[in-house]
Image (cartoon, rainbow, N blue to C red):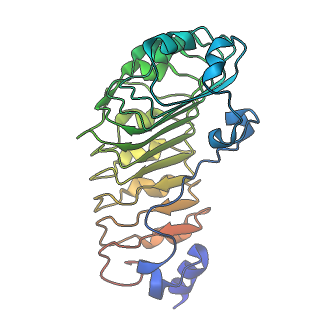
Amino acid sequence: MGKILSITLHLGLCLGTLACFVSPVFAQVRFDSTDPEVLKGYGSPMGVTYTERSGLKDKNTQKLMLTGFLSEKEQRQLSQLSQLEILFLKNNHLQQLPSSLNQNSLLFILVSNDNPLSYFPPELGQIPSLLYLEMTQTRLDSLPFELAALGNLELLRIFYDESDSLLFVDSMPGLPSLRSIEFYNVNLHRIPDFVFRCKNLESLMMVNCKIDSLPEDIAQLSKLKILDLAGNNISELPESLLRLNNLSEINLAQNQLSQISERFAYQPKLYYLNLKGNPIPSPRLCL
């Protein structure tokens, strides 16, 4: 009973209810969008006071939200806003982001919501100041090698991509400043190789992404604190996952795991482990 008790204490769980414990299947976004290092004090992009369409005519505009159809002329005007720092595009019927945004040298937050983007211009890899990139309701089937040129990018977020598969170039290098990757309902099928080259990554969230396996390469992410792979098809966990001593939260709900090593109970910083919805035959850790 002593070993069972130590597992209970380390994980903060009652092993009798482990298989149905804790949060809803799909976790909330883990990244702190109010982090001043990322948003420079502006707070969440949704909480910013924006200039709307009239801001296209003011070269001093810093925060701009554009909702509804965006003409080619208006897209060209964006590149003339030399002081633009935050751009929020919503429901503009865009199939690609304007490549001329690479001329906005101060832009550090770029959000595209409800645009059926099917192409990501390589030129956007030339925005040196970009820290935060979010795209939702897209139709992307690939992201270019040039994405890796975003050396200051800290957060990459893609939600609800409708393509059959989102591909990354295998040889793409890691992004040196990237701290958080958040993909939700994106048909990845596997974790892209470049992820394991992002040595400063602290949060990896790939929920409902049809991922079949977790590679041994996960051990390369030595700074990882949060791992959220809920809603995938993972049936085994690599031994190398146990070498990530900074992990504090693991969400593996709704996968195909049939057992979990008791060694997770001795991870030094782990306090949250969600295994809800896995076919684990026993309600306790498999010893």
Q: From the viewer's perspective, is residue 149 above or below residue 88?
A: above
Residue 65 falls in image quadrant: top right
Residue 170 percent location from the top left of the image: 31, 28
163 up-or-down from 234: above or below: above
Q: Position of residue 217 (x, y in %)?
A: 39, 43
194, 286: nearer the viewer: 194
Look at 34% across and 48% down and name the residue there: 215
Identified at 61% across, 79% down, the residue is: 9
User: Residue, x 45% and y 34% (percent of image)?
Assistant: 91
Is 153 on the left or on the right of 231, as rendered?
Answer: right
Image point 59% across, 53% down: which residue? 246
Residue at far right of view: 41
Image quarter of the C terminus:
bottom left
Which of 262/198 is in front? 198
Residue found at the far left of this picture? 164
Is residue 124 found left or right of 6 in the rendered image? left
158 on left or right of 65: left
In the rendered image, residue 187, in percent from the top left (x then y), is placed at 29, 45
Residue 49 % position (x, y): 71, 35
Please state the total of marks drawn on the protein image. Answer: 0
Q: Residue furthest bottom?
A: 1
Foreground of the two, 258 or 92: 92
